[in-house]
Image (tube, rainbow, N blue to C red):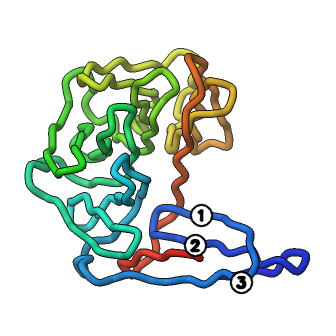
Amino acid sequence: MQKCLGGTRLALVALLGLVFASVASGQSITEFSAGISPSAAPLGITTGSDGNLWFAENGANRVARITPSGVVTEFGAGIAGMDILFITAGPDGNLWFTETTSDQIGRMTPSGVVTEFNVGISPSSQLLGITAGPDGNVWFAEFAGNRIGRITPAGVVTEFSTGISPFSGPFGITAGPDRADYPGRSRHRVQRRHHGRRGRREHHGRPRRQPMVRRTE
């Protein structure tokens, strides 16, 4: 979808779960579907340490890689958990993703080797958003558990609930410019959790129907 803004085009580019906003003149959009399984239902997406993009295939229960030229590789080996929704590039150079209905965090190397973690995660937590924190760890939102979780690169999990209002339902999470994590909450609130150095942002939105990747130029 394109919208005029003061003579400059504002292009909103969505990959099912990720929305990019970029302002530029003369942009074009390229869509990629080759190599993506029809039932994949891509959702979260992130830039990997290998220079490629990585995205979660919620419908196929896989993680996929797409090169800047649009070549897609899907990875499913070693993923035992269910309902992969969001993904982030970790401080260790690996990809980290949430397995929502399995209450697990998955870690995948750029070569596709998967390790899953569930020790320290409370049952029925319903993990959603995930992001790399400025402290060198990975942080995630527990929607049903009403908590924020932290997992170290070694897989040690700590859960936090103090200061989170009951039934808030933390959904997305991002590292802010003020050295804090900001989990988005389903009841019209945003919370800040302060620690370490600056981090990055992961943006997530609603899924689209057709499995496709779009590139704007």
Between tags 3 and 1, which lies in front? 3
Residue occupying the point 26% across, 47% down: 101
User: What distance separates the C-alpha of mark 3 from that of mark 1?
Assistant: 17 Å
Q: Secondary structure at mark 2?
A: strand
| Amino acid residing under circle 1 | Phe
| Amino acid residing under circle 2 | Val
Q: Residue 61 at x, y = what percent?
A: 21, 60
Q: Earlier in the sequence, mark 2 or mark 3?
A: 2
Q: Front-most of 142 and 28?
A: 28
Q: Could you tell whether 155 is left or right of 88 in the image?
A: left
Q: Secondary structure at mark 3?
A: loop
Question: Is there a contact, CB below 8 Å, between mark 2 and mark 3?
Answer: no
Residue occupying the point 58% across, 21% down: 197
Question: Is there a contact, CB below 8 Å, between mark 2 and mark 1?
Answer: yes
User: What distance separates the C-alpha of mark 2 from that of mark 3?
Assistant: 15 Å
Q: Could you tell whether 21 is left or right of 212 in the image?
A: right
Looking at the image, residue 21 lies above or below residue 3: above
Q: Secondary structure at mark 1?
A: strand
Which of the 4 image quadrants contains residue 165?
top right
| Amino acid residing under circle 3 | Gly
Q: Earlier in the sequence, mark 2 or mark 1?
A: 2
Which of the 4 image quadrants contains residue 144?
top left
Q: Residue 68 at x, y = what percent?
A: 41, 69
What residue would you read off at disc 2? 13
User: What distance separates the C-alpha of mark 2 from that of mark 1?
Assistant: 5 Å
What residue would you read off at disc 1? 20
Q: Residues within 10 Å of mark 3 (few under 14, many from 20)?
A: few
What residue would you read off at disc 3? 26
Which label sits on residue 168?
none
